[in-house]
Image (cartoon, rainbow, N blue to C red):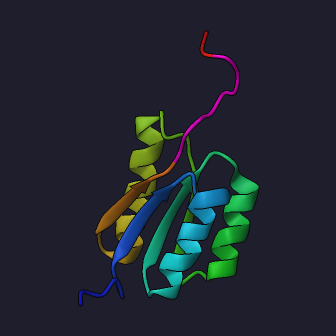
């Protein structure tokens, strides 16, 4: 069975919820993480929890190509590449569709 150990994942929407829990699960499997989210404080807290050798936090808006490119460049410089992307960032609005 293939392993994820020493792979590198870029996770958007990583600061909380599904993104944060998936990042924790990937870290337990030995994955290095480039974490992206708009909300810098919980993102930094998650990166600190996971450890500097495992995670790189980059506060960025995924709609801003230059900001995402900067995060990618930093992650590639730190971890050597990107093997998978979890595109989890999103905006939800609640209400009637009618």
**Residue 93 position within the rendered picture, expressed as x and y whole percent measured from the top left:** 66, 27
Q: Is residue 94 located in the magenta-colored stretch of the structure? A: yes
Nearest the viewer among 25 and 83 is: 25
Q: Residue furthest left?
A: 1
The correct choice, above or below, for 69 with respect to 18 in the image is: above
Q: Main secondary structure of the magenta part?
A: loop
Q: Which residue is at a point 61% across and 9% down the rendered structure image? A: 98
Q: Is residue 51 located in the magenta-colored stretch of the structure? A: no
Taking the image as shown, residue 6 lies to the left or right of residue 49, namely: left
Taking the image as shown, residue 66 lies to the left or right of residue 58, namely: left
Taking the image as shown, residue 30 lies to the left or right of residue 17, namely: left
Q: Which residues are magenta?
A: 89-96
Q: Which quarter of the picture shows residue 2?
A: bottom left
The correct choice, above or below, for 87 with respect to 1 in the image is: above
Q: Residue furthest top?
A: 98
**Residue 66 position within the rendered picture, expressed as x and y whole percent measured from the top left:** 42, 39
Q: Which residue is at a point 35% across and 67% down the rendered structure image? A: 76
The correct choice, above or below, for 30 with respect to 96 in the image is: below
Nearest the viewer among 41 and 93 is: 93
Q: Which quarter of the picture shows residue 8?
A: bottom left
Q: Can residue 51 be seen by looking at this rendering?
A: yes
Q: Which residue is at a point 58% across and 76% down the rendered structure image? A: 24
The correct choice, above or below, for 93 with respect to 79 in the image is: above
Q: Which residue is at a point 70% across and 53% down the rendered structure image? A: 40
- Of the 4 image quadrants, the one containing the N terminus is bottom left
């Amino acid at each position: 069975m293939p392993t994820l150990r020493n792979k590198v994942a870029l996770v958007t929407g990583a600061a909380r919820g599904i993104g944060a829990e998936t990042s924790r699960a990937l870290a337990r499997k030995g994955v290095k993480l480039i974490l992206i989210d708009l909300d810098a404080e919980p993102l930094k807290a998650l990166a600190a929890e996971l450890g500097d050798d495992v995670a790189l936090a980059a506060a960025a808006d995924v709609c801003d190509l230059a900001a995402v490119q900067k995060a990618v460049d930093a992650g590639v410089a730190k971890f050597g590449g990107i093997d998978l992307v979890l595109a989890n960032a999103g905006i939800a609005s609640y209400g009637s569709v009618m």
